[in-house]
Amino acid sequence: MGTAPNASVVFAVVFVPPSTAGGKPNANQQPNPTPPAAAPAGANPPGPPMIANGIAMLQDARSNLQTAGDYWGPHLVNALKDIDQALGVCGVAPPPSNGTTPQPWANKTLMTLGTQRVTKAQNNFTNAKSPWGGRRDKALPFITKALQELKLAAASYKGPTVSN
């Protein structure tokens, strides 16, 4: 007899409008003057779904690129600054350093992943229907510039490589 892993625990919250036992609305119910609490820090990125997904892609890309190695030159540094500016326009603080330092080699896998994620972020921002108060249009030039810098970094690379 084999063993299967335990199933995940699922929680659900059901909101029911206030009513009397007979199912009719309670006329004495007072509106709640307090707005709902804001999402906790570190929750999903802000904005419409496509933009929120793009922000998450930028955060992941930044994490990848941050440890892609030292041999990519100033273009990688510029791309990271552009990503930070795009996140700033969206009201998102850049993620803190992931605690690792760039390695004295070039990790092409991390560079490729980071570039792919910036490209996905650009697609999400471009295809978002909502301009999100103009933030989408302000962030897009920084994302485009980051991609240009990443292409220049890849083209100008000179040094040893390690792939994971």
Image: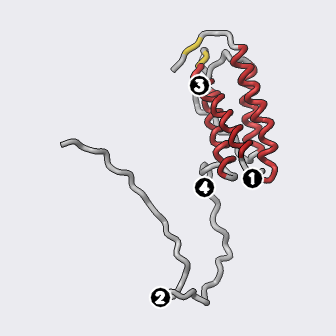
Q: Earlier in the sequence, mark 1 or mark 3?
A: 3
Q: Which mark is residue 21?
A: 2
Number of numbered markers: 4
Marks 1 and 3 close (CB-CB < 8 Å) = no
Q: Depth-wise, is mark 1 or mark 3 nearer the camera? A: 1
Q: Position of residue 55 (x, y in %)?
A: 67, 43
Q: Depth-wise, is mark 2 or mark 4 nearer the camera? A: 2
Write down the residue under mark 4.
40
Write down the residue under mark 1.
130
Q: Residues within 10 Å of mark 1 (few under 14, many from 20)?
A: some
Q: Which residue corresponds to the image point at 54% horizontal and 18% vertical from the top-left? A: 163
Q: CA distance from mark 2 to mark 4?
A: 35 Å
Q: Which residue corresponds to the image point at 61% horizontal and 89% vertical from the top-left? A: 28
Q: CA distance from mark 3 to mark 4?
A: 30 Å
Q: CA distance from mark 4 to mark 1?
A: 24 Å
Is residue 152 left or right of 31 when viewed as pictured?
Answer: right
- Which quarter shows the N terminus? top left
Label 2 sits on a secondary structure element that is loop
Rendered image quadrant of residue 162: top right
Q: Which mark is residue 110?
A: 3
| Kind of residue indicated by mark 3 | Leu
Q: Residues within 10 Å of mark 2 (few under 14, many from 20)?
A: few
Q: Position of residue 130 (x, y in %)?
A: 75, 52
User: Above or below — where is 44 with respect to 149?
Assistant: below
Q: Position of residue 75 (x, y in %)?
A: 75, 21
Q: Earlier in the sequence, mark 2 or mark 3?
A: 2
